[in-house]
Amino acid sequence: MKPSKIQTPGAQKSKEAPAEVTRRSFLNILWAVLGLAALAEFLWLTVSFLRPAKPGSAESETDTVVPAGALTAFAPGTVTAFQKGEFYLVRLEDGGLLALSCKCTHLGCTVPWVEKEKKFLCPCHASAFDITGSVITSPAARPLDTYTVTVENKIVKVDTGRRFKRSRFDSGQPVYPPKE
Amino acid sequence: MKATTPAADRPQRRFNLLGTLVLHFRPRRVPERTLRFTLTWGLGGMAVVLVLLQLFSGLLLKFAYAPVPTQAYESLVRLQEGFLFGRLVRNIHFWSANLLVVVVCLHGLRVFFSGGFHPPRRLNWVVGLSLLILVLASNLTGYLLPWDQLAYWATTICLGVLEYIPLVGSRLQQIALGGPQIGPAALRNFFALHTAVFPALIVMLMAFHFWRVRKAGGLVIPRAPAEELAKPAMVPTNPDLLLREAAMAMAVIAGVLVLSLLYDAPLGQPANPGLSPNPTKAPWYFAGIQELLVHFHPSFALLIVAALAFGAFYLPYLHYAETPAGVWFASATGRRTALAAAVAAGVATPLVVVLGEYAVDFSAMMPGLPQALSLGVVPTALLIAVVAGFYAVMARMFQASRLESVQAVFVFLAVGWALLTATCVFFRGQGMELRWPF
């Protein structure tokens, strides 16, 4: 059957007013909408298939809090590297604690702490950061990222599950253990 | 055509496989002048041969390689030491990959400068550029697979750049990495892209590319600037074209073999996520971007790259008054403007690099401003002013048409880009400081 050959009153009318919806054009639109919906579903499926496991899922929460050690192990003005969690635990001169990511904020190289110069020096593109993670030398544009530090029963813990970006160092960022 | 096949062409029907398979892409006869070696330099054919070499050597490598961080490096060591010709196969893959980038770029330049991007070849220019991007993507994803220090850190900084793409950057990076840093998920992703997605796309687009060449009536026919095209003399594809192509293909294969025998593909220390080497450089074909990053705020460096890429794609659609297909550098004026542009870029680029290193520090000159302004907006605006000024000077000084001026800007940017790439590859040492390579 060739529907286009059948002269229905509707088809006659549509010649005069092309905007009118015929059965044929309605079904065509329906097909197009269904097709687009299917495409959107496939896209959504693909994207969610490729998306990495969400941070904060049940598995990661238990794993990410790293006990760094007793508070007394971190003397003021020192930087301690933690290879496993890939962060530095910094004890500032005033006793504040900071957990700094060891990834350079420029392009992601690992920055070693150079004790002699009291600086984090990126070997890749010569960015330098001070003990608070603030930029001394560009190209890095923002300070080293931080992780959440908590002190419980004089034990320092670092949550490596979530990395925080910051635009500058301010006094609200270090965690101060309760005074004796 | 079918009814009036000349008697001279008939014998080729005997080669049935050749006639139905290889010649499927080809007309029976081609204009004699398109066979001239100095029209194409055989670059398109070279690229095909290199892609085939890539596919075959890659297929062999796939039987030896383990795409897991703990085994990848060892599997390559085993390949090189335990497999018959294992090292040679890897070398062939390495060399043909690098040569492919060079050859595809040269092929693009040849097409551009011989006017091969005018109608009806405009779409094929876009297809060709897409192929270049796919070749670069294949190279980058393959770069990580050896899982040595070079691979790990070069890929780290390439993916680090993604973060600066506005809005979608972080998410893109997340998807590519599959985690907070390069690890098993990233290796899995790269392996899948490198061995399935990109090769499939390349092969499909290549078929489309060739088909468009045929639709356009073959290659541009070379001619002098003032020469009118008469009816070209034709010769049979077989043997006149095929023999030349076969000779070229064998020369390319021989060249790759010699390179692979003489120079080994690098395999350094196994990847160590805790220790970045100094300096860490991107693969050479992305070194231009890395050099831009030295001078510009990352978001603006990416903006410039995106603008250049868009400009390259849009080149055929600029409504030129004349479309001199087959004339090298468009015209006599075009040759002069192109030469002037090459000289200008050859002087200006090293000057800017050296000044940027030792004399001019925009972020120190404007201490009150955020880096996005002093290292982003200001130098980008300067660059745009230079390019726009250059275009105006070309149009005024040489009475250049739009086509000739656009070509001059293209030459200016291409030479500049090549010099930036060379700067990063050869002249950057520890801490990305300028140094003399010898």
Image (cartoon, helix red, strand yellow):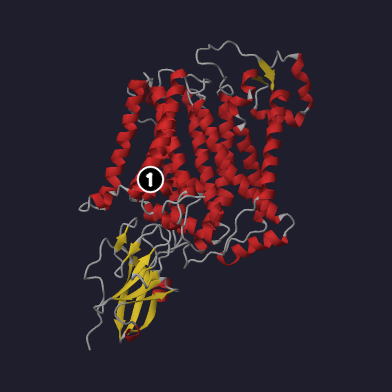
- Residue B206: x %, y % from top left: 58, 36
**Which residue is rendered at x = 63% and y = 36% of the image?**
B46
Q: Is residue B237 left or right of residue B102?
A: right
- Residue A95: x %, y % from top left: 26, 79
Q: As displayed, is residue B113 above or below residue B140?
A: above
**Which residue is rendered at x = 34% and y = 49% of the image?**
B358
Instruction: Residue A96: name its quadrant.
Output: bottom left
Residue type, label 1 = Val
Residue sitting nearer the eye, A112 or B84: A112
Please give the residue where the numbered disc 1 appears in the rendered image.
B354
Q: As displayed, is residue A86 above or below residue B387?
A: below
User: Residue furthest toward the left?
Assistant: B368
The reply to whether residue B416 is visible in this rendering is yes
Q: Is residue B157 left or right of residue B66?
A: left
Q: Is residue A108 left or right of residue B40?
A: left
How many numbered badges does the structure rendering display? Answer: 1
- Residue A72: x %, y % from top left: 32, 86
The reply to whether residue A29 is visible in this rendering is no
**Which residue is rendered at x = 53% and y = 12% of the image?**
B227
Q: As displayed, is residue B232 above or below residue A35?
A: above
Task: Tell which subunit mark 1 falls on.
Answer: B
Q: Tag 1, which secondary structure?
A: helix
Residue sitting nearer the eye, A91 or B70: A91
- Residue B343: x %, y % from top left: 43, 31
Q: Is residue B369 left or right of residue B314?
A: left
Crowd rating for badge 1 (residues with CA inside 10 Å; few <14, some 14–19, many 20+): few
The quarter of the rendered structure image containing the N terminus of chain B is top right
